[in-house]
Image (tube, rainbow, N blue to C red):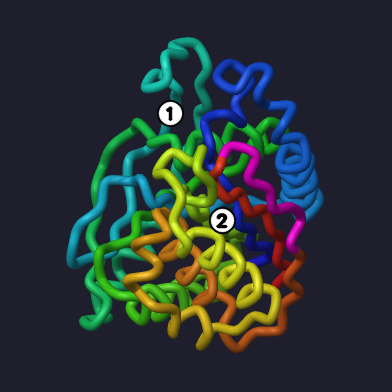
């Protein structure tokens, strides 16, 4: 059953060895991660289902990584020592692939890779320090449209709620990378508008509003979190939830949103 959901950023600067002094500018985000970790612990979460926009994905199918266990590292960023290890929830992964096999309009496939991308690694480094027996189900979005991602989230919720496993869903999602002149992608007028719209629609739990956002403007905003967030909206659609934005900041020209949702 789904117990808790969250939206978290995945900036490598959140890692001590990468961010170093720059982490001070992300104090509010790091504090929000601590609150989410505490909730995962007190809610006795057994499995974390996480979707990362940077996971290897297929253009026409959603996918799950079904390796027996996973290791996340920061080798890509020059840190060869930091790592996080977590076992897979093989039972839930098997249930997902069997259930989605019967859902023709939501193509679903499996991959197998023990190495996690940083979209998983950064959140896990910050959230799993006290979760000694927690398992992971890593998901990847597809290149299908927002409506398909919403329906994927809805179906995912149905499957999760049919299990007795105390499950948390986490959308690993950075917002616009084009907020200011100093942003990695430079500035675009769509960047700040995208972040403001996402925050407003989530605060109101306005699923239809999220779906109706202009796709060209979303692309121009230079974001990576829209589809994971729409997937989360699908999980929460039609349910009684409490959405709390814990933090939003953009000290380096990228929008970092951290939010907690009780189911």
The residue tagged with tag 2: helix, strand or loop? strand
Considering the image in quadrants, where does the N terminus appear?
Answer: bottom right
Question: In the rendered image, which residue does mark 1 sit on?
Answer: 71
User: Residue at coordinates 60% horizontally, 57% vertically from top-left?
Assistant: 7
User: Residue at coordinates 47% horizontally, 71% vertically from top-left?
Assistant: 230
Residue 249 colored magenta?
yes
Camera-nearest label, 2 or 1:
2
Instruction: Give the left or right position of residue 215, taking residue 157 as reference.
Output: left
Considering the image in quadrants, where does the C terminus appear?
Answer: bottom right
Instruction: Give the left or right position of residue 206, taking residue 57 as reference.
Output: right
What x and y, as percent, mark residue 169? 57, 59
- Please tell me how many numbered marks the rendered image carries: 2
Magenta residues, start to end: 245-252
| Residue 18 vertical placement versus 206 (above, below) | above
Residue 133 colored magenta?
no
Instruction: Give the left or right position of residue 62, taking residue 6 as reference.
Output: left
Q: Which mark is residue 170?
A: 2
Nearest the viewer among 178 and 68 is: 178
Instruction: Give the left or right position of residue 34, taking residue 69 as reference.
Output: right
Q: Give the mark, 2 or 1, whose residue is nearer the N terminus.
A: 1
């Amino acid at each position: 059953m789904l117990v808790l959901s969250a939206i978290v950023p995945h900036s490598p600067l959140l890692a001590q060895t990468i961010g170093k002094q720059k982490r001070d500018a992300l104090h509010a985000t790091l504090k929000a991660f601590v609150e989410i970790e505490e909730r995962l612990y007190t809610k006795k979460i057994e499995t974390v289902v996480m979707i990362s926009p940077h996971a290897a994905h297929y253009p026409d199918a959603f996918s799950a990584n079904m390796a027996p266990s996973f290791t996340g590292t920061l080798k890509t960023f020059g840190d060869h020592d930091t790592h996080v290890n977590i076992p897979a929830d093989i039972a839930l992964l098997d249930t997902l692939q069997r259930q989605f096999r019967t859902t023709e309009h939501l193509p679903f496939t499996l991959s197998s890779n023990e190495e996690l991308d940083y979209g998983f690694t950064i959140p896990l480094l910050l959230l799993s320090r006290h979760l000694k027996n927690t398992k992971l189900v890593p998901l990847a979005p597809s290149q299908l449209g927002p409506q398909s991602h919403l329906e994927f989230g809805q179906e995912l919720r149905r499957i999760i709620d049919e299990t007795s496993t105390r499950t948390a869903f986490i959308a690993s999602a950075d917002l616009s990378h084009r907020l200011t002149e100093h942003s990695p992608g430079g500035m675009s007028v769509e960047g700040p508008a995208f972040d403001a719209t996402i925050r407003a629609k989530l605060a109101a739990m306005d699923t239809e509003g999220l779906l109706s956002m202009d796709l060209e403007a979303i692309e121009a905003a230079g974001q990576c979190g829209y589809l994971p967030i729409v997937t989360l909206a699908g999980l929460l659609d039609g349910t009684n939830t409490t959405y709390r934005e814990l933090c939003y900041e953009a000290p380096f020209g990228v929008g970092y949103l951290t939010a907690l949702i009780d189911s």
